[in-house]
Image (cartoon, rainbow, N blue to C red):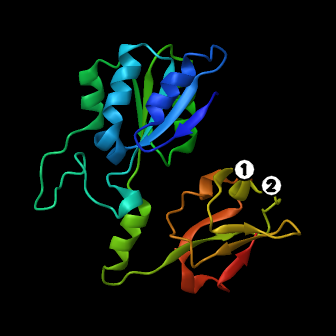
Amino acid sequence: MGELLMCMGASTGMASGLSLFNDARKVVAFMGDATFFHAGLPGILNALFNRHNVTLVLMENGTTAMTGHQDHAASGHNFNAAVDKIPLRQVLEGFGIQNIYETDTYQQARLKEIVGQAVADEGLSVVIARHPCMLKFMRQQKKKSGYQQRVVAIDDSKCRQIHACVEEFACPTFTRDREGQVTINHDLCIGDGSCVQTCPVKAIAAPRPLEQLPSKKTRE
């Protein structure tokens, strides 16, 4: 695919520089939606203006996740009240960017497909990968009456120890031991179910209440 870059606000500028000396591969940069408004716009505009061969993946989760879930210009809220959202796509289209793709981040097969399309485009292309921040969402759910913690589990009859959950999905919930067996740490599992579609033999069961599991940790 090409070079991969992630840096707060600098990824598109760095990607533009790398693209000047890279004719063989497309450079791919990553940026969050909060950073997009905070410091990302100049680099994107520069890449468009100078026709750099870059694909930008914009990770839109509706919050400033890395510094405490503060609101930003596309969140629909400021510190005091609800406000009109400033949509990422409208800003990109206002710049004149033609190749813009959108999908839910949890639709992994679709996301992979459109990233491939974006990388094949000449010049600047943008993929908006959209899904709410699940850490923030689950914290909000825990405050509701009747909340039940839900976690994933492993179906031992299906597991073939392919380890896609560890090596490709890389969720810290999954840990592999020396024998190749994988345990699920339910203290870390937020129960969003995003990992279920990553297993090629469908050995990860959908989230269910923690009380329904035989033990706190389940082997793969």
Tell me which numbered mark, 1 or 2, is placed earlier along the sequence.
2
Residue drawn at point x = 29 percent, y = 17 percent: 96
Q: From the viewer's perspective, tell me whether residue 159 is left or right of residue 41.
A: right
Specify the quadrant of the image occupied by residue 48. Answer: top left
Above or below for 172 versus 17? below
Residue drawn at point x = 25 percent, y = 30 percent: 91
Q: Amino acid at mark 2?
A: Ile
How many numbered callouts? 2
Above or below for 173 versus 97? below
| Quadrant placement of the N terminus | top right
Residue drawn at point x = 37 percent, y = 65 percent: 137
Identify the residue under disc 2: 162
Disc 1 vs disc 2: which is toward the camera? 2
Asked if residue 29 shows in the view, the reply is: yes
Q: Amino acid at mark 1?
A: Pro
Label 1, label 2: how far apart the Cα atoms are: 8 Å
Identify the residue under disc 1: 200
Horizontal and vertical percent for residue 12? Answer: 45, 31
Q: Are marks 1 and 2 in contact (CB under 8 Å)?
A: yes
Specify the quadrant of the image occupied by residue 23. Answer: top right
Q: Which structural element holds mark 2?
A: loop
Toward the right, the furthest residue is 179
